[in-house]
Amino acid sequence: MKDVNSKLERLLYRRLQKSPDPAQDLISKLSHVKQQAYFNKPEFLEMCSWKSPRPRHLYQSNSSALIRRVSIEVFAADCEKQKVELLTSLKGVGVPTASAILTLIDPQDYGVIDIRVWQLLYQCGAVATRPSGVGFSCENWLEFLERLRDWARNFNVTVRDVERALFEHHKENQEGTLYG
């Protein structure tokens, strides 16, 4: 794991930059959500659609009351697994969308689990499962989050910064098609 960390740390050292986050406007718009400790249906729809607009009809099928109740429970949850399980109980929300919701609300502590980032982590040996970078489980999310939080602490940046650096590196260096 030491070789893996040093390879990824060199990559991150080169890539971490203070470029503006393309999601910054949405993150700013949602900055009140963490303090109020819940989100409403329009905010939920905007966060979900930012990650993946395709299942919008499923996102919309969740009632306002359910979204509010689940979001209150997410903010009250003590563990990351419980947060993701609660969010994925909503129609249309998988682990990647749940991670996007958490990231948009708290980019300091969260990053979006994504095919590009996972494939890069797999190629570098930082994770050992799901080489395709699809079909994430809650356990994959926890492993992902642990790795990114370690690097964020080491570089004194946000978890979102680490995720973005890895995403951009993969995007610029990808060979072949994304979905294999």
Image (tube, rainbow, N blue to C red):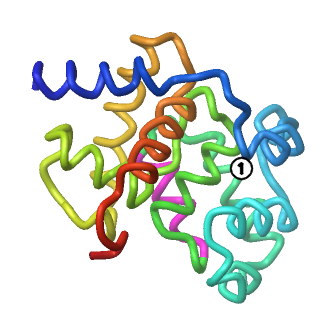
Check the picture and name the quadrant holding the N terminus. Answer: top left
Left or right placement of residue 153 versus residue 144 in this view: right
Which quadrant would residue 19 be assigned to in this image? Answer: top right
Residue at coordinates 32% horizontally, 52% vertically from top-left? 118
Above or below: residue 71 compared with residue 55: above
Residue nearest the observer in this picture, 156 or 76:
156
Q: Position of residue 87 (x, y in %)?
A: 57, 61
Above or below: residue 43 compared with residue 29: below
Q: Which residues are magenta?
A: 81-90
The magenta stretch spans residue 83: yes
Left or right placement of residue 85 versus residue 121 in this view: right
Residue type at tag 1: Ile
Q: Position of residue 162 (x, y in %)?
A: 48, 31
Q: Secondary structure at mark 1?
A: helix
Residue at coordinates 39% horizontally, 56% vertically from top-left? 116
Residue nearest the observer in this picture, 46 or 118:
118
Q: Position of residue 49 (x, y in %)?
A: 71, 69
Which quadrant would residue 131 be assigned to in this image? Answer: bottom left
Callout 1 environment at 10 Å: few (<14), some (14 to 19), or many (20+)? some
Residue at coordinates 48% horizontally, 38% vertically from top-left? 163
The magenta stretch spans residue 131: no
Q: Position of residue 168 (x, y in %)?
A: 49, 44
Residue at coordinates 83% horizontally, 59% vertically from top-left? 43
Where is mark 1, residue-wise? 72
Mostly what secondary structure, the magenta segment? helix
Above or below: residue 110 compared with residue 96: above
Check the picture and name the quadrant holding the C terminus. Answer: bottom left
Left or right placement of residue 137 versus residue 93 in this view: left
Which quadrant would residue 25 be assigned to in this image? Answer: top right
